[in-house]
Amino acid sequence: MPLDALDAIHGRRSVGRLDEPAPRGDDLDAILAAAAAAPDHGELRPFRFVVLDGDAKDAFGAVLERAYLLRCERAGTEPDPAAREKERTKLDRAPLVLVVAAVRQPSEKIPWEEQLAASAAAAQNALIAATALGYGSMWRTGDVARDPVVKAALGLGEDDAVVGFLYLGTGEPIAAKAARPRSPDGLVRFWQPT
Ligand SMILES: Cc1cc2nc3c(=O)[nH]c(=O)nc-3n(C[C@H](O)[C@H](O)[C@H](O)COP(=O)(O)O)c2cc1C
C-alpha cells in the first residue's frame, strides 16, 4: 500500500548504501510517470531521464573514471588512485541509478532557470514516488554532474544540465542526515505592508 503524499515527503531520507530490490517494471514506470508530471512552465518538457541498471550501470562507471582522468589532465594534476577507484565504483552504492537531466528548450518566454526548476521538481517527484512505494533513495551530484564527458555520454549537450543522479534501492537512512533540522522555523514570515 503506497504511503500518502505527506507521509512520503516526511519519510524520505537520504540512504547512502542501497541494495536490491530496486524499483523496476511497474514501480519504475510509476516513478518515471510521477517525475514527468512535475510542474512545467510553458509545457516545454525540458526534463529527461536516463536509467542506469545492470551491465549498463557498470559500464557507466568506466565513463565516470575516464571523465575523472580527463578532469585531472585539464587541471594539470596527477590522478589520485583512490579517487579514480571511487569514480569507477561510485554507482555501486545502489542497484539502480536514475539520472534526471534538463535539456534546454528554445523559448522566448521561459528562461533556462525555470526549465531547471521544473527538472528539479521532476527529480523530487521521483524521490517522493520512490519513497511512497517503499524504496530508499539519494540525490547526488558533485563534479560528475557538471562534467562535459559525462554529459556527452548521457546524450546531453554542454548547455544542458544533469540535475541529479538519483540512487534507488533499499536500505537504511544516513543517521547524520536524518537528524538534520527539517522544520520551517525561522524560514517563514507572513508579509505585511509597511
Ligand atoms: C541538488 C542536490 C544535490 C545533492 N548532491 C549530493 C551529493 O553530491 N552528495 C551528498 O551526500 N548528498 C547530496 N544531496 C543530498 C543532500 O545532502 C541531502 O538531501 C541533505 O543532506 C538532507 O538529508 P535528507 O535527504 O536525508 O533529508 C543533494 C541534494 C540536492 C537537492
Image (spheres, grey):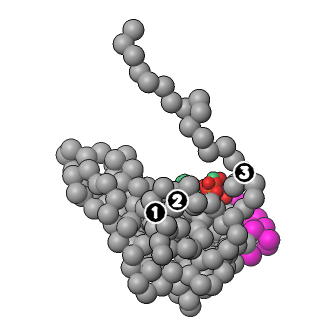
The image's mark for residue 179 is 3
Residue 97 or 57: which is nearer the viewer? 97
Q: Is residue 81 magenta?
A: yes
The image's mark for residue 4 is 1
In the structure shown, which secondary structural element does the residue marked by tag 1 occupy? loop
Q: Which amino acid does label 2 sit on?
A: Asp
Asked if the residue under mark 1 is in contact with the one under mark 2, i.e. CB atoms within 8 Å, the reply is yes
Residue 31 or 145: which is nearer the viewer? 31
Residue 86 or 9: which is nearer the viewer? 9
Measure how far apart labels 2 and 3 are at the Cα level.
17 Å
Q: What residue type is labelled 3?
A: Ala
- Give the vertical position of 177 relative to 189 (above or below): below
Task: Name the quadrant of the C terminus.
Answer: top left
Horizontal arrangement in the rendering, residue 77 relative to residue 94 (left or right): right
Horizontal arrangement in the rendering, residue 179 relative to residue 7 (left or right): right
Task: Give the image location of residue 90, x and y in percent.
Answer: 67, 73
Res 92 quadrant in image: bottom right
Residue beneath the point at 37% across and 46% down: 113
Residue beneath the point at 19% across and 46% down: 108
Task: Give the image location of residue 85, x and y in percent.
Answer: 74, 76
Asked if the residue under mark 3 is in contact with the one under mark 2, i.e. CB atoms within 8 Å, the reply is no
Q: Give the range drawn in magenta.
A: 75-85
Sooner in the amino-acid sequence: mark 3 or mark 1:
1
